[in-house]
Image (cartoon, rainbow, N blue to C red):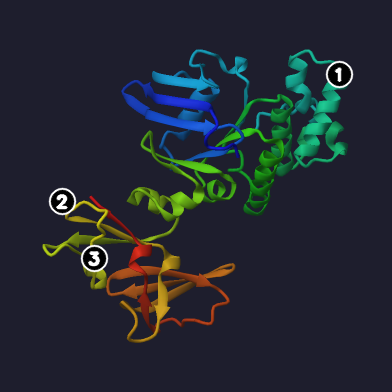
Amino acid sequence: MAEATSAPILTLRQIDKFFGDINAVERVSLEIQEGEFFTVVGPSGSGKTTLIRLLVGMDKPTNGDILLRGKRINDVPANRRPTCMVFQSLALFPHMTVGQNVEYPLKCRNRPKPERRERALACLKVAHLPESYYDRPVTQCSGGERQRVALARALAFDPEILFFDEPLSAIDFRLRKTLEKELKDIQRETGKTFVYITHSLEEAMVMSDRIAVMRNGRIAQIGTPREIYTSPNSRFVSEFMGEVNTLPVVVDDSGEVVCESLNLRLPLPASLPRDKRSGSLVIRPEDLRFARDGEGLIRGTVFNEYLLGSRVQYQIRVGATTLLVEQLRDTDTAMLRDQSVALTFTPTESMLFLE
């Protein structure tokens, strides 16, 4: 990834996009560095697809400016921008071979045939497709192979920025995991700037240098995957970034945080405002630990367990409250259904959001 001190390749300044009375994108400002894998993630209706349409040039912003290397490009149409889009539908030409699909942007530029073939073969190699695929009808390619053909075609265009609109959403889980790693490797090998749109948290975490989380047309938080996961700035971001235990709390007159559902009292962190009286305590499942009798802060009963590959997740009932506890599968601590257990956690590893 490019150094954070370098000039951004793409800048958004206070971007709005209205569709009638609906504000699909609202006051969005961000900078994307050259050579960065930047992902925009959010739930359905958050505005991420509208945002990428603005970046590509398929729509114009209602307000604000989009700058490419410092030059305003609001009114530059998509076909005149040095960028390329890989769509969810891939938009491959079914009547063409793999090689013809990859060569198409070069043919539009009137490049000579030998140059087109040489470039296409080079891009197929980068996209992890063998040279023998050059003459194969694209209709005879599998879903994953078509993904690679679409990527090779985008690379043949030699854009400054590649945009991706949920290109892996229709791929089965096992292949998607492979393609996630391949995309990250290809981005590193080529040094291209990738801007990726997805609703999948796992895709964003695996591939990205930085992530922008969107909600209701706004940017909720921008940071590295580690920053957003370990230091979310809101309850929404913490819940969006994975399964969590969210518990209602109040701040009493003594300044302590009271979680009645777990019969807990915790000190109010000095960094939080003193004028808020309620909110949520958020504890990630991996931050809850089983403890020996007498050492636990919380007592409950094992209700169920879920095997998650290398991890195991337990559902613990604490009165009317259900907690999720997660640990490595090879841990010596194995729990049985209906077993009474004690749980503990480090308060500084939890998250407290006051409203």
Left or right position of 104 against 248? right
- Residue highlighted by disc 2: 275
Q: Marks 2 and 3, how far apart in space?
A: 15 Å
Label 2: few (<14), some (14–19) or many (≥20) C-alpha neighbours in 10 Å: few
Q: Is residue 325 visible?
A: yes
Name the front one of labels 1 and 3. Answer: 3
Q: Which mark is residue 113?
A: 1
Residue at position x 88%, y 21% from top? 114
Q: Amino acid at mark 2?
A: Asp
Dot 1 crowding, Cα within 10 Å, few <14, some 14–19, many 20+:
few
Marks counted in the figure total 3
Q: Which residue is mark 3?
A: 267
Residue drawn at the location 44% of the way across and 74% of the way down: 304
N-term mark: 1 or 3: 1
Residue found farthest to the front: 5
Q: Position of residue 15 (x, y in %)?
A: 40, 24
